[in-house]
Amino acid sequence: MIRKGWAALAVATLATAAPAGQDQSLTRLRWLAGCWELNRGNLITTEMWMAPAGGLMLGASRTVAGPAAREWEQLRLSVRDGRVVYTAAPSGQSQTDFTATTVSDTGFMVENAAHDFPQRIIYRRRGADSLIARIEGNTPGGPRGIDFPMRRVRCEAT
């Protein structure tokens, strides 16, 4: 179930965002560049983003449990017709586009009402070294939301 407090905070945080019809430059999302980690004991998710260049921010995510990779995802942020588009291809599945409804210096929200789950993806910056990524939408069992709190980590070459 979507927590009302989190949703209200997300709306307030994104209140200064560019409306959907205005240019939503990737420059406002430069803060996302780098490496982020969610550490839940034996389960570690790492998400890496390149800085914006050439109209793209490329990203990748990997979840590892012990010695085995459990999930991975290829990610892309681009601008089409003046709007940010988030493209995700999780664990080798077909890619799905989500179009930004809000973009600000502290976060963004993208949506695709036709997608099974999630229908919304939200990234919210919390200071210089942390963020919360959230997926939410409707499922056969009702509304669902999952938070992924991450902290900035050093990008490793190995």
Image (cartoon, rainbow, N blue to C red):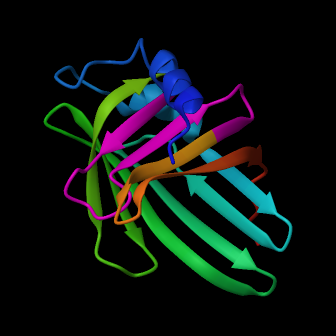
Which sits in the foreground, 53 or 26? 26
| Residue at the image point whose x is 38% and y is 57% from the top | 118
Q: Residue furthest top?
A: 16
Q: Relative to residue 117, is residue 152 depicted above or below?
A: above
Looking at the picture, does residue 106 appear above or below residue 129? above
Q: Is residue 152 shown in magenta?
A: no
Q: Quadrant of residue 102?
A: top left
Q: Where does the image place residue 92, in percent across and percent down from the top left?
A: 40, 81
Viewed as shown, does residue 21 lie left or right of 71?
A: left
Coordinates of residue 158 in the picture (x, y in percent): 76, 72
Find the residue positioned furthest to the left: 81
- Give the x, y percent position of residue 148: 63, 51
- Residue 32, quarter of the rendered image: top right
Tell me, yes or no, whether the highlighted magenta stretch contains residue 115.
yes
- Front residue of this view, candidates 54 and 68: 68
Magenta part of the chain: 106-131
Residue drawn at x 57%, y 77% is: 71
In the picture provided, is 39 more to the left or to the right than 141?
right
Compared across the picture, whether 158 is left or right of 123 comes to right
